[in-house]
Image: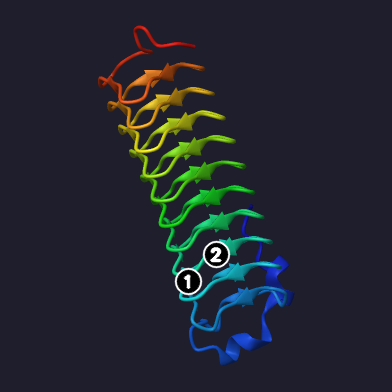
Amino acid sequence: MERDPARYRPWVHRRAATMSHIDPTATIHSTASVDPSATVEAGAMIGCDVTVGRNAHIGVNAIIQPGVSVGEYATVRDEALVGPGTKLGPGSTTGRAARIGPQVEVGTRAVLGDRTHIESGSRISAGALVEQRTTLRKGALVDRDARVGSRVSVGPRAWIGAGARIGSRTALGARVVVGSNAEVGNRARLEQGIRVPSNTVVPPRTRNMAGASS
């Protein structure tokens, strides 16, 4: 997932010079499909078989790797990198310098903050928010309308239920389950396999949780 300009030299799309929303320094693979209303900023790179929808915005020096789908009105901010086969839903936002792995799904109007790191196979459902500098490990799920604070670590295959709230600087281990509309306070630490029932409040700085199942 590194930036290698040499790999992109043959990719310059002949249509780029005639599409007013595409910066002349952007490189677009000839098999990519970019809607005429989309904006592609300076230095951006769009790989093979990518689809960029209506009124989408690709920021400065962003990299969109092969097979990615960028929905209509979606935004990929400057310096972000989106891995192969990922789907960015309509109206979603991928933050500045975010790193999105392969085969990730980002739902409609979901927001990924600046410098988030989303590993392969993760899913962020419609309306969810993942704040800046948070990491989702492989296969993690953030369900619809959930909120995950800044600098949070979410372990592999952890599940954050619909409408749940995860405080900043919290760590969730592998396969932790946070039920729908539950709240986990700032700087809490939940070990592998812990289950937080729906509508439960876990206080800040909790280490595991009395009465939780694992």
Side of 38 relative to 8 (left or right): left
Disc 2 marks a residue whose amino acid type is Val
Which residue: 58% across, 36% down?
139
Residue 67, quarter of the rendered image: bottom right
Q: Are marks 2 and 1 in contact (CB under 8 Å)?
A: yes
Furthest toward the bottom, the residue is 18
Seen from the viewer's position, the closer of residues 197 and 137 is 197
How packed is label 2: few (under 14 Cα within 10 Å), some, or many (20 or more)?
many
Query: Is residue 65 toward the left or the right of residue 72 in the image?
Result: right
Mark 1 belongs to which amino acid?
Ala
Give the residue pinned by disc 1: 56
Q: Position of residue 189 (x, y in %)?
A: 38, 19
Residue located beneath label 2 in the image: 70
Position of 70 with respect to 112 (left or right) is right
Residue 208 x/y as whole percent: 38, 13
Residue 156 is left or right of residue 165, and the answer is: right
Provide the secondary structure element on which disc 2 rests: strand
Residue at the location (67% across, 73% down)?
Answer: 32
Q: How many marks?
A: 2
Q: Which residue is drawn at 43% across and 48% down?
A: 115
**Tag of residue 25:** none
State whether residue 200 is above or below residue 128: above
